[in-house]
Structure formats: C-alpha cells, structure tokens
Amino acid sequence: MNILSVFKEYVILAACIVVSLNLLALNDAHQIRDIRSAAIVVVCKLQEQLDLIPNIFTLRQENRILRERNVHLANEVNLLREAKLENVRLRRLLGLKDRPVFTYVSANVIGKNHQPMRTTITLDVGERDGVKPNMAVVSDAGLIGRVVATSDGYAVAQILLHKDSRVSVQIERERVDGILY
C-alpha cells in the first residue's frame, strides 16, 4: 500500500493551505491586508500561549548551567569564609582594632539646588535624628556627598558634583590613595 494513498486527503489539505498562504502573502489588496492583520494577531496570541510552555531541553540546559554556577558560588563562599577567619586571626595577632560599625539614617530628598558647580540637596532628617555636619550621605550605589548644615528636622548635603567637594579615595585593585574632586 502506497503511503500517499493513505494520507492523500492530508497531503492535498497541506498543499491547499500552502498555496492559500502564498496567495495571501503575495497579494497586496486592502481586504487581504485586513485578513493578514487578523491572522498575525491570532498567530501572535497563539505563540504567546505556546511560549508559556517551557521547552524541556532548554530547562535541562539551564538547570545544568545553574547547578554548575551554584557549585562555583558555594566554593567561592567557602574561600571567602576562610579568608575572613584568617583576616580575624591576623588582626588579633597584629593587635588591630575592629572597624567601626556605622548606623544609617534613612532620608528623603525634599529639595535640590541645581546651580552649576554648587549642587546641594535638602534631606528630611536633622539633628533630632542624629545627623551632624560632615557626616557622609550614601545611597545603595555608594557615596553621594556630605552634610554641610543641619537644623532640628532638616539637613543640607553637598553632593560630589559641588565645586568644593573633595573626597579621599582608594583604587581597590591597586590600593592607590588619591583625592577625588
């Protein structure tokens, strides 16, 4: 028995669909454009739904990569723990004091001065919150500036873009000291 005779109807249907899609793609009439737009919407919605079904091969590969990364990070954590313990022992042997622990005060910026080279910000915390002049102003990205004036409930901070701003810095890799201004 010939395989084409068994699936003759399916082969004819597939050929008709291919010919129809080619005619739709090559025709630029207004009605065809509307049909094409509707078809694109349907196909995109279907594709969005199919994309939600995870590909098992991709998941296996991603799982393997994540396991390797996990092993690498666990090894790095162990090395860092050992380095920390060694650091503590060496500091004790050398008689070095522990580094100070800083307390942070959360604040909102309630005002900005945008004068060129005299950039400052006003914060909604002040002396009653424990803020004093020359305290550092930091964010999650690092140092922003320093407090230059305080009142009971407000503080004015000079940010690093201010023309009079100077900060002692150290390049982490080379351990070279300098002044940022």
Image (cartoon, rainbow, N blue to C red):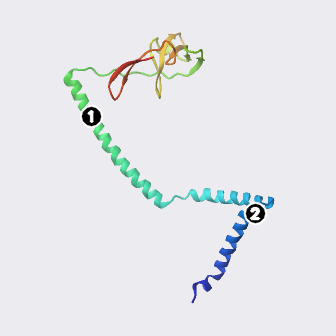
**Residue density around tag 1, few if under 14, some if 14–19, many if 20 or more, within 10 Å:** few
Assign the N terminus to one quadrant of the image.
Answer: bottom right
Q: Which residue type does callout 2 highlight?
A: Asn
Q: Residue 151 in the image: state x and y as whole percent.
A: 53, 9
Q: Quadrant of residue 166?
A: top left
Asked if residue 36 lies left or right of residue 79, the reply is right
Asked if residue 60 lies left or right of residue 120, the reply is left
- Residue 83's disc number: 1
Q: Secondary structure at mark 1?
A: helix
- From the viewer's side, name the closer residue of 68 and 161: 161
Q: Quadrant of residue 168?
A: top left
Assign the C terminus to one quadrant of the image.
Answer: top left
Could you tell me which residue is drawn at 66 percent across and 60 percent down? 43
Q: Which residue is mark 2?
A: 27
Q: Residue 46 in the image: state x and y as whole percent.
A: 64, 60
Residue 127 visible in rendering: no
Q: Residue 69 in the image: state x and y as whole percent.
A: 37, 48
Residue 86 visible in rendering: yes
